Image: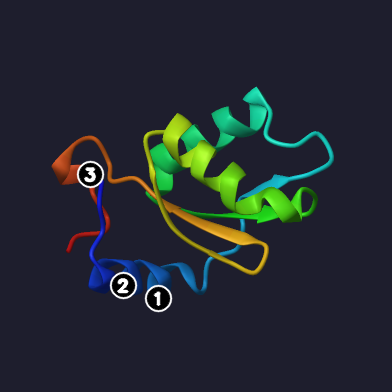
Amino acid sequence: MELTSKQRKTLEKLAHPLSPVVIVGGNGVTEGVTGMVDSTLAVHELIKIKFNEYKDEKQELSAQLAEDCNATLVRVIGNVAIMYRPAEKPEDRKITF
């Protein structure tokens, strides 16, 4: 899903008070991390992922995670990535544009 700059700004504002729900540690982006991101996106639509390790590769790893989970990488700010994936059913969507 391609986002406009206005949509990105809206998602960034909505993500600001959120705490990271997935943390990438010493093992990197494993299948477990990918599964956690996928299941968390299914419930919350908008999440933050914190990089405690692999900080130099966070942009590439975030883009790969977004692709693997069929999500959109909103932005990487510092060591935190913001991802968005709308709910499958329109009536379950919490975020609308």
Q: CA distance from mark 1 to mark 2?
A: 5 Å
Task: Name which residue lies at 19% across and 36% down.
Answer: 89
Mark nearer the N terminus (3 vs 1): 1
Task: Name which residue lies at 26% across and 46% down.
Answer: 1
Q: Secondary structure at mark 2?
A: helix
The amino acid type found where label 2 is placed reads Thr
The amino acid type found where label 3 is placed reads Asp
**In the figure, 13 relative to 61: above or below?**
below
The x, y position of residue 80, in whole percent, is: 62, 61
| Disc 1 to disc 2: CB gap under 8 Å | yes
Task: Name which residue lies at 24% across and 73% down.
Answer: 6
Q: Residue under label 3, please give it.
A: 92
The amino acid type found where label 1 is placed reads Lys
Mark nearer the N terminus (2 vs 3): 2
Q: CA distance from mark 2 to mark 3?
A: 19 Å
Camera-nearest label, 2 or 3:
2
The x, y position of residue 59, in whole percent, is: 58, 53
**In the figure, 24 relative to 76: above or below?**
above
Q: Nearer the viewer, residue 21 or 11?
A: 11
Q: Residue under label 2, please give it.
A: 10
Task: Name which residue lies at 15% across and 44% down.
Answer: 91
| Disc 2 to disc 3: CB gap under 8 Å | no
Q: Nearer the viewer, residue 32 or 9?
A: 9
- Quadrant containing the C terminus is bottom left
Q: Nearer the viewer, residue 46 or 3?
A: 3
In screen coordinates, is 22 left or right of 64?
right
Dot 2 crowding, Cα within 10 Å, few <14, some 14–19, many 20+: few
Q: CA distance from mark 3 to mark 1?
A: 21 Å
